[in-house]
């Protein structure tokens, strides 16, 4: 019996076919923006968030050579802007990578230095920024557009939980007087319909690491002593003798005190879980005060 053996030789180039999957290198100034873009980018991105230390004040961050190297290699850079991470602007100006995209959140929102820079605490701003992130990822990597769109839609659905909870607070506690040691909380108080009565000069000064005007300190103390305020909110990452005194004064008056953080804490938590935990704490504090407990 005769067997015919046919040998087929494949071209050498077939065996060496390039199976590399493109991974976008992304640098975010802070971990709240980094976390959001990583959820949209998924397995097609590698994200480095520069500021994430729970024991540091982000306003006081100083960049280093590792940061500069990361900026040089980045395909996409996300900065908060409005003077919040001006160190990032300096690194960008010293780096000349072609075709790199930059998202300056303040510019996107029409904000400038001197405005309250804590944009990630505003739910509407978060939605606007994440929509831009999706657009930018698709522009950088159009072959995976459907993947980014699916992830973006999943993120929006997940974000709705804490955002709906804010709306619920407005329905239950709208008009309630609350206070905060700095203006980071203003972006939550407004959509929640809460009356943030603490002196703006006090909140802005503490946020910037400055001493508040003496008159604002006296005004704030009198507000707490008057017991009209139902909840005091403070930033755990900006602790000073003055803010500690305000916390103690509030506690002495039976006013619930809750802490929030400027960056995601713990750092491995998702943005939406972090926000949701803080909003739940706020809701519980308002409920406790309302019930007279």
Image (cartoon, grey):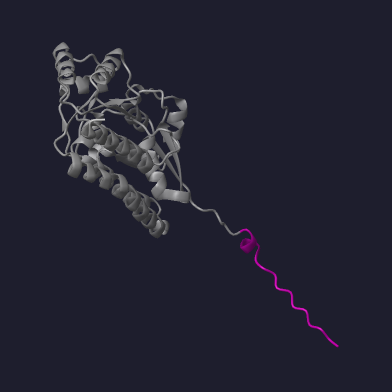
Q: Is residue 155 visible?
A: yes
Where is residue 95 drawn, in percent x and y?
A: 39, 33
Q: Main secondary structure of the magenta part?
A: loop
Toward the viewer: 196 or 290?
290
Where is residue 3 drawn, in percent x and y?
A: 81, 83
Where is residue 199 drawn, in percent x and y?
A: 15, 22
Check the picture and name the quadrant holding the C terminus: top left
Where is residue 104 drawn, in percent x and y?
A: 29, 38
Toward the viewer: 249 or 29?
249
Residue 50 inside the magenta-drawn segment: no
Total marks shown come to 0
**Residue farthest to the right, as pictured:** 1
Left or right of 153? Residue 210 is left
> Is 258 located above or below residue 135 in the figure?
above
Left or right of 96? Residue 182 is left
**Residue farthest to the top, as pictured:** 214
Left or right of 37? Residue 23 is right
Q: Quadrant of residue 245?
A: top left
Residue under the image location 15 percent in, 27 percent down: 197
Residue under the image location 40 percent in, 53 percent down: 141
Toward the viewer: 134 or 282?
282
Toward the viewer: 215 or 293?
293
Query: What is the span of residues highlighted in magenta in the rendered image?
Result: 1-16
Residue under the image location 74 percent in, 74 percent down: 7
Left or right of 53? Residue 256 is left
> Is 251 located above or below residue 143 in the figure?
above
Residue 6 inside the magenta-drawn segment: yes
């Amino acid at each position: 019996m005769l067997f015919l053996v046919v040998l087929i030789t494949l071209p050498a180039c077939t065996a060496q076919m390039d199976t590399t999957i493109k991974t976008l290198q992304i640098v975010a100034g802070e971990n709240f923006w980094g976390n959001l873009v990583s959820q949209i980018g998924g397995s097609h991105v590698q994200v480095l968030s520069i500021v994430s230390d729970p024991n540091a004040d982000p306003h006081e961050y100083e960049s280093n050579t590792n940061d500069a190297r990361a900026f040089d290699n980045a395909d996409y850079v996300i900065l908060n802007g409005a003077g919040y991470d001006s160190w990032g602007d300096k690194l960008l100006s010293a780096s000349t990578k072609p075709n790199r995209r930059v998202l300056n959140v303040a510019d996107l929102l029409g904000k400038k230095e001197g405005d309250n820079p804590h944009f990630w605490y505003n739910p509407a701003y978060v939605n606007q920024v994440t929509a831009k992130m999706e657009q930018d990822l698709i522009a950088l990597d159009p072959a995976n557009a459907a993947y980014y769109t699916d992830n973006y839609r999943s993120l929006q659905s997940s974000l709705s939980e804490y955002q709906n909870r804010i709306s619920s607070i407005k329905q239950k506690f709208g008009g309630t007087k609350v206070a905060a040691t700095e203006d980071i909380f203003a972006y939550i108080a407004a959509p929640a319909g809460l009356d943030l009565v603490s002196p703006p000069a006090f909140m802005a000064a503490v946020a910037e690491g400055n001493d508040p005007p003496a008159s604002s300190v006296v005004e704030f103390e009198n507000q707490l002593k008057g017991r009209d305020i139902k909840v005091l909110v403070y930033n755990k990452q900006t602790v000073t003798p003055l803010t500690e005194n305000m916390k103690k004064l509030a506690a002495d008056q039976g006013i619930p005190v809750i802490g929030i953080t400027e960056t995601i804490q713990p750092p491995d938590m998702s943005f939406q879980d972090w926000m949701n935990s803080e909003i739940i704490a706020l809701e519980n504090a308002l409920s406790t005060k309302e019930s007279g407990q």
